[in-house]
Image: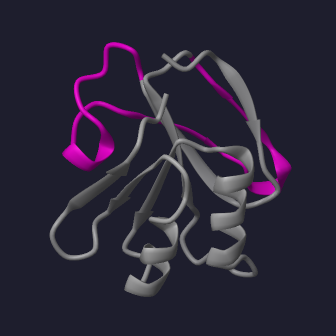
Amino acid sequence: MIPAHTFTSSLPLMVGWIEPDGAKDPAGGGEHKLGATTVGGRSVAVPDCRVWYVEPRHGMDNVSWNDVIAEVGRQKIPGLSVGKQIDDATLERVGELDPCSISTSRGAPKSRTRGSCS
């Protein structure tokens, strides 16, 4: 269980979580909640949860995958949802992060998990 906390980032990220009694993770299509966005430097209140994750806002305009990967590593964000916005080379770099769940919907849905997200 991850305790409630406040997440802040200067990057435009959507923040979501799987509640303690949630059935499945986002990669499995189960119960999860999207919380809010950090656009404009806003903070997001993340409740007690089994895992929480970020997803870059579509387009990311002036933000690169290097920025997102660095932010996930620096803040030890336990999950990253990448949607259809990522190429294979970048996905490989994401997979090198210390324990991180990766969800992508490019083509057939797949999930890759490294280590523990608690």
Q: Residue 33 colored magenta?
A: yes
The reply, left or right, for residue 22 in relation to residue 9 is left
Question: x, y (%) of residue 104?
Answer: 33, 64
Question: x, y (%) of residue 114?
Answer: 39, 50
The reply, left or right, for residue 1 in relation to residue 20 is right
Residue drawn 73% across the image and 36% down it: 7
In the image, is residue 85 above or below residue 8?
A: below
Q: Residue 28 colored magenta?
A: yes
In this picture, which residue range is highlighted in magenta?
Answer: 19-47
**In front of the other: 34 or 81:** 81
In the image, is residue 98 above or below residue 62?
A: above
In the image, is residue 20 above or below residue 16?
A: above
Residue drawn 72% across the image and 46% down it: 75
Residue drawn 43% across the image and 76% down it: 92
The type of colouring in the image is: one colour
Total numbered badges shown on the rendered structure: 0
**In front of the other: 60 or 116:** 116
Residue 108: name its quadrant: bottom left
Question: x, y (%) of residue 69?
Answer: 63, 66
Question: x, y (%) of residue 99?
Answer: 49, 46
Residue drawn 44% across the image and 86% down it: 89
Q: Residue furthest left?
A: 108
In the image, is residue 62 above or below residue 96?
A: below
